[in-house]
Amino acid sequence: MTNILAPSILAADIMRLGEQIEAVHKAGAEYLHIDVMDGVFVPSLSYGVCVVESIRKSCDMVLDVHLMIVEPDRYVEAFARAGADIITVHLEACDDVRDTLELIHSHGCRAGLSIKPKTPVEDIEKYLDQIDLLLIMSVEPGFGGQKYFPESTQRIAQARELIDRQDHPIDLEVDGGITLENVREVLLAGANVIVSGSTVFHGSEADMAALMKSLRECER
Ligand code: DX5
Ligand code: ZN
């Protein structure tokens, strides 16, 4: 299975967004991770549908939209129409998880389900048959540049075991505090999609190359 890098544009320089997206794509990133925050589910506000729409017009990467919002059902259609490829919602934010996942699929997108660090991994087990991506948060969602919670590694391994028992492919994505120092640990625990904000956009070209090298070297 090939490992995938999903740079989070939360850490990008908004005035140079276009050129920065082009640079990460050229360097080998396949997904572009877009963090949508509503100031309710998480304290921060970020951006919404029109940002996805505008990126879609000039970018052919897989747009991986991470909804950190309450009542995600209200926005699924709009993000799908804007050009999202993957729409990930939080288990903690859904009234009826199955309905929400079905809604995402009905609009032609891949469905992702995410859990915060304190939500037990086993809580997602009953939804695995319906998802294309599981997103394990390795920091409390809401801000970029935080420190990776070490206990995430065990949670990733537990999620990998559950995923491997399914008979359809599910991406195992990890988000928050991933650096050049811990990326191998995260991959070896079983993740195959690495979200990275600060390491990609605040680092050098050499850092980006080193990150891609780790991804290639840890392929299963
Ligand atoms: C946090 C976001 C992350 C964040 C990752 O709530 O979901 O995607 O941008 O940024 P880093 O890599 O800096 O932790
Ligand atoms: Zn995210």
Image (spheres, rainbow, N blue to C red):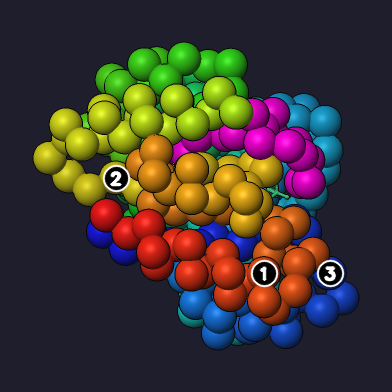
From the viewer's perspective, is the residue at label 3 or at label 1 nearer?
1
Does the numbered disc 3 mark a residue whose Cβ is under 8 Å from ligand 1? no
Residue that mark 2 sits on:
170
Name the side, left or right, on which 3 lies relative to 39. left
Q: Could you tell me how far apart the alpha carbons at marks 1 and 2 are, in whole angstroms?
A: 28 Å
Q: Regarding mark 1 in the picture, which secondary structure is present there?
A: helix
Which quarter of the picture shows residue 26?
Answer: bottom right
Residue at the (22%, 48%) spot, across then down: 169
Residue that mark 3 sits on:
13
The disc labelled 2 sits on which kind of residue? Ile
Which quarter of the picture shows residue 59?
Answer: bottom right
Name the side, left or right, on which 202 lies relative to 177. right
Earlier in the chain: of badge 3 and badge 1, it is 3
The residue closer to the viewer here, 156 or 112, is 156
Does the numbered disc 2 mark a residue whose Cβ is under 8 Å from ligand 2? no
Residue that mark 1 sits on:
207
The disc labelled 1 sits on which kind of residue? Asp
Earlier in the chain: of badge 1 and badge 2, it is 2
Residue 21 in the image: state x and y as whole percent: 65, 76
Membership of 135 in magenta stretch: yes
Q: Label 3: few (<14), some or many (≥20) within 10 Å?
A: few
Name the side, left or right, on which 18 lies relative to 174. right
Q: Are marks 3 and 2 in contact (CB under 8 Å)?
A: no
Where are the magenta residues, as a range?
A: 133-149
Earlier in the chain: of badge 3 and badge 2, it is 3
Q: Regarding mark 3 in the picture, which secondary structure is present there?
A: loop
From the viewer's perspective, is the residue at label 1 or at label 2 nearer?
1
Name the side, left or right, on which 45 lies relative to 25. right
